[in-house]
Image (cartoon, rainbow, N blue to C red):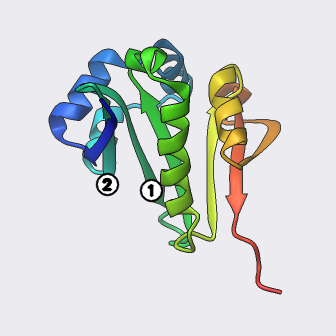
């Protein structure tokens, strides 16, 4: 069975909250995010399922100060460990390519420096990872992508 995506529902959010994988749980805690569920309920997010199981929720939220800048994010359930890396990569490339298609001038967010799998993944997707400590406790690294400028 293939992976499927759909607009996330409140039930998807509740399922993610109950089954958030350990690495992402540590990252959310380190980021001091007070109301993750509430933030997701207010956001335009998608759900990714494999064999009916929730794999992740993801989105790309515009920054309030500059609507050409957005923050991409991905949170996974423990199902991520059983999903084919190749299948996950194909979906991720498709999604990120849509985000980089001209709608956004800059995509940027932070990743927990100790989440080696996530750091490697955002690099593989084409983001620059800036290994200077940022965020709560200096535990995060910024990752970013900037659209090429017309010459």
Which residue was labeled with disc 1? 61
- Give the secondary structure at mark 2: loop
Which residue is depicted at the point 66% across and 36% down? 135
Instruction: Point out which mark residue 130 bears.
Output: none
- Give the secondary structure at mark 1: strand
Of 101 and 111, which appears nearest the observer?
101
Q: From the top left corner, tell me how far across and down residue 137 is, in percent.
A: 68, 25
Instruction: Tell me: residue 114, above or below residue 61.
Output: above
Give the Cα distance between marks 2 and 1: 7 Å
Instruction: Characterize the local packing of mark 2: few (<14), some (14-19) or many (20 or more) Cα atoms within 10 angstroms.
Output: few
Could you tell me which quadrant the C terminus lies in?
bottom right
- Residue occupying the far front of the picture: 1
Total marks placed: 2
Q: From the top left corner, tell me how far across and down residue 53 is, in percent.
A: 27, 23
Instruction: Characterize the local packing of mark 1: few (<14), some (14-19) or many (20 or more) Cα atoms within 10 angstroms.
Output: some
Which residue is depicted at the point 71% across and 49% down? 126
Residue 35 visible in the picture? no
Q: Earlier in the sequence, mark 2 or mark 1?
A: 2
Which residue was labeled with disc 2? 44
Q: From the top left corner, tell me how far across and down residue 98 is, in percent.
A: 50, 62
Of 114 and 123, which appears nearest the observer?
123
Could you tell me which quadrant the N terminus lies in?
top left
Which residue is depicted at the point 63% across and 71% down? 105
Assess whether mark 1 and mark 2 are in contact (beta carbons under 8 angstroms): yes
Q: From the top left corner, tell me how far across and down residue 20 is, in percent.
A: 38, 19
Instruction: Tell me: residue 45, above or below residue 53.
Output: below
Instruction: Tell me: residue 46, above or below residue 117.
Output: below
Of 129 and 96, which appears nearest the observer?
96
Left or right of 3, for residue 151: right
Residue 61 visible in the picture? yes
């Amino acid at each position: 069975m293939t992976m499927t995506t759909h607009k996330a529902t409140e039930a998807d959010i509740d399922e993610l909250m109950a089954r958030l994988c350990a690495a992402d749980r540590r990252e959310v805690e380190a980021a001091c995010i007070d109301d993750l569920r509430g933030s997701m309920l207010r956001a335009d997010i998608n759900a990714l399922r494999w064999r009916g199981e929730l794999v992740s929720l993801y989105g790309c939220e515009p920054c309030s100060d500059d609507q050409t800048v957005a923050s991409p994010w991905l949170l996974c359930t423990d199902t991520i460990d059983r999903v084919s890396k190749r299948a996950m990569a194909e979906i991720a490339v498709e999604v990120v390519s849509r985000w980089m298609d001209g709608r956004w001038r800059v995509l940027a967010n932070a990743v927990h420096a100790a989440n080696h799998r996530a750091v490697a993944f955002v690099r593989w997707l084409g983001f620059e990872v800036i290994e200077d400590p940022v965020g709560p406790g200096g535990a995060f690294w910024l990752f970013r992508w900037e659209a090429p400028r017309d010459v």
